[in-house]
Amino acid sequence: MRILHAKKELQMERITRKNLESMIDTLNNIKPMSDSKFALDIAYGGYRLVKRYNATGGEADLSVRVSARELWNIMQSIRNFYWA
């Protein structure tokens, strides 16, 4: 039983779109920017972090298109940078 329990702890939880959107909200609340917001771009099964500059849709890419887990790690790094 102990071995099975140890294996369960080593498994990483799945990162979903909801997790990423929640982290986007966190980033936007940590560093409020009047003229821009962090946003999520989803296409072709990948995710990209972008910065929206205005209501008409001007965007700048902040990351390349990656998996949900990789983008989660990128956003955690940004969050930790602002919290430091």
Image (cartoon, rainbow, N blue to C red):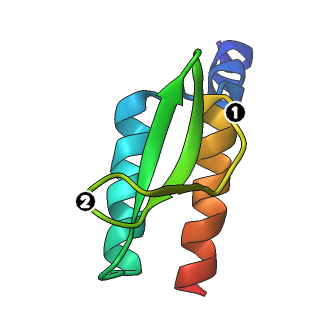
Give the residue at x 59% y 15%. Answer: 44
Is 63 on the left or on the right of 53, as rendered? right
Q: Position of residue 39 (x, y in %)?
A: 41, 51
Location of residue 10 with respect to 36 vertically, above or below: above
**Which residue is at a point 28% across and 55% down the rendered structure image?**
56
Q: Earlier in the sequence, mark 1 or mark 2?
A: 2
How crowded pointer 1 is (Cα within 10 Å; few <14, some 14-19, many 20+) is rated as some
Left or right: 64 with respect to 37? right
Instruction: Give percent across and percent down for residue 58.
Output: 42, 57
Tell which residue pokes out farthest to the left in this image.
55
Q: Residue 80: percent from the left, percent from the top? A: 60, 73
- What element does badge 2 sit on? loop
Determine the secondary structure under disc 1: loop
Mark 1 belongs to which amino acid? Val
Question: In this rendering, is residue 47 above or below 30?
Answer: above
Residue 81 can be seen in this image? yes
Which residue is more in the foreground, 8 or 33? 33
Depth check, front residue: 3 or 33:
33
Residue 66, which numbered label? Answer: 1
Residue 15 in view (yes/no): no
Quadrant assignment for the N terminus: top right
Question: Percent x, y for residue 35?
Answer: 34, 78
Task: Residue at 32%, 58% (x, y): give it.
Answer: 25
Q: Find disc 2 in the rendering and name its residue.
A: 55
Amino acid type shown at disc 2: Ala
